[in-house]
Image (spheres, grey):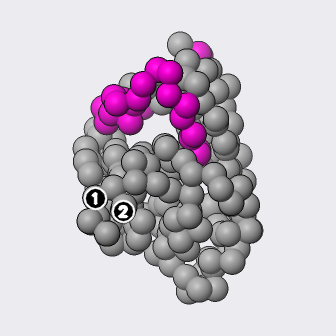
């Protein structure tokens, strides 16, 4: 295991890959900084791995203020700049939504919607209570049950905690399928795209 940084154990994360055929081509979107451990982890799959580092977009995340979803949506679409035809099988959000307002989360979901399909799954970290302390970090996947937390390059991001039930209402294109409270008060969440569980 690489030295340095805090370690967080995951219990639901392995389920993202429980039905993945080793020969199947995976398309993965991570809303975070590319970490060598993460790249190494996905090297075992036939995989297209794309990093979209929202943590490195402080002008986007810090300039949320009291802006509405409509005001924020163009910025998120521009920041994502995803290929029009690309659809992702797995989305990794880490804790970025804990630094976003409700309208910003909905704007992000709207920008992602064209890039999801019926079997898209997602993973995120939330909080059980707004009193849960912030541990702003960049995440690296050591293995399917272990994350390494590294110091964040942008320590000035404003903490905007959303308890699980509140976050669920903001996720317009995802449904939280399973959630598990972790020892530090954070909540690990597995999500499915709306077409996956909606009859439409």
Q: Secondary structure at mark 2?
A: helix
Please give the residue where the numbered disc 2 appears in the rendered image: 194
Residue at left offset 64%, top offset 85%: 71
Q: Are marks 1 and 2 in contact (CB under 8 Å)?
A: yes
Nearer to us in this view, 114 or 103: 114
Q: Quadrant of residue 65?
A: bottom right
Residue at left offset 50%, top offset 21%: 23
Nearer to us in this view, 103 or 7: 103
Q: Position of residue 164 (x, y in %)?
A: 30, 60
Looking at this rendering, what residue extends furthest in the top direction?
Answer: 1
Residue at left offset 66%, top offset 69%: 76
Q: Is residue 120 left or right of residue 84?
A: left
Nearer to us in this view, 100 or 109: 109
Q: Position of residue 139 (x, y in %)?
A: 56, 37
Q: Is residue 46 left or right of residue 127?
A: right
Residue at left offset 68%, top offset 50%: 53
Asked whether the viewer can see residue 102, the reply is yes
Q: Position of residue 186 (x, y in %)?
A: 35, 48
Compared with residue 40, is residue 14 higher up or lower down, i.e. above or below? Answer: below
Compared with residue 53, is residue 17 higher up or lower down, i.e. above or below? Answer: above
Residue 17: in magenta span:
yes
Q: Position of residue 106 (x, y in %)?
A: 49, 73
The C terminus lies in quadrant: bottom left
Q: How many marks?
A: 2
Asked whether the viewer can see residue 132, the reply is no
Range of residues picked out in magenta: 2-30
Q: Secondary structure at mark 1?
A: helix
Q: State how far apart marks 1 and 2 are (Cα).
A: 6 Å
Residue 126: in magenta span:
no
Q: Disc number at residue 197? A: 1
């Amino acid at each position: 295991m690489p030295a340095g940084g805090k370690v967080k154990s995951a219990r639901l994360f392995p389920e993202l890959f429980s039905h993945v055929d080793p020969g199947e081509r995976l398309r993965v979107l991570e809303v975070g900084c590319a970490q060598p451990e993460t790249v190494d982890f996905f090297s075992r799959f036939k995989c297209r791995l794309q990093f979209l580092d929202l943590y490195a977009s402080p002008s986007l995340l810090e300039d949320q203020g009291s802006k509405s979803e409509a005001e924020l949506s163009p910025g998120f679409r521009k920041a994502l700049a995803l290929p029009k035809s690309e659809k992702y099988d797995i989305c990794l959000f880490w804790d970025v939504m804990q630094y976003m307002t409700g309208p910003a989360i909905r704007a992000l979901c709207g920008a992602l919607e064209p890039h999801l399909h019926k079997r898209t799954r997602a993973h995120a970290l939330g909080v059980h209570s707004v009193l849960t302390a912030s541990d702003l970090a960049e995440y690296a996947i050591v293995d399917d049950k272990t994350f390494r937390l590294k110091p964040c390059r942008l320590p000035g991001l404003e903490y905007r905690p959303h308890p699980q039930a509140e976050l669920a209402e903001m996720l317009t294109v995802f449904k939280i399928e399973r959630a598990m409270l972790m020892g530090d008060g954070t909540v690990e969440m597995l999500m499915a795209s709306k077409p996956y569980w909606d009859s439409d």
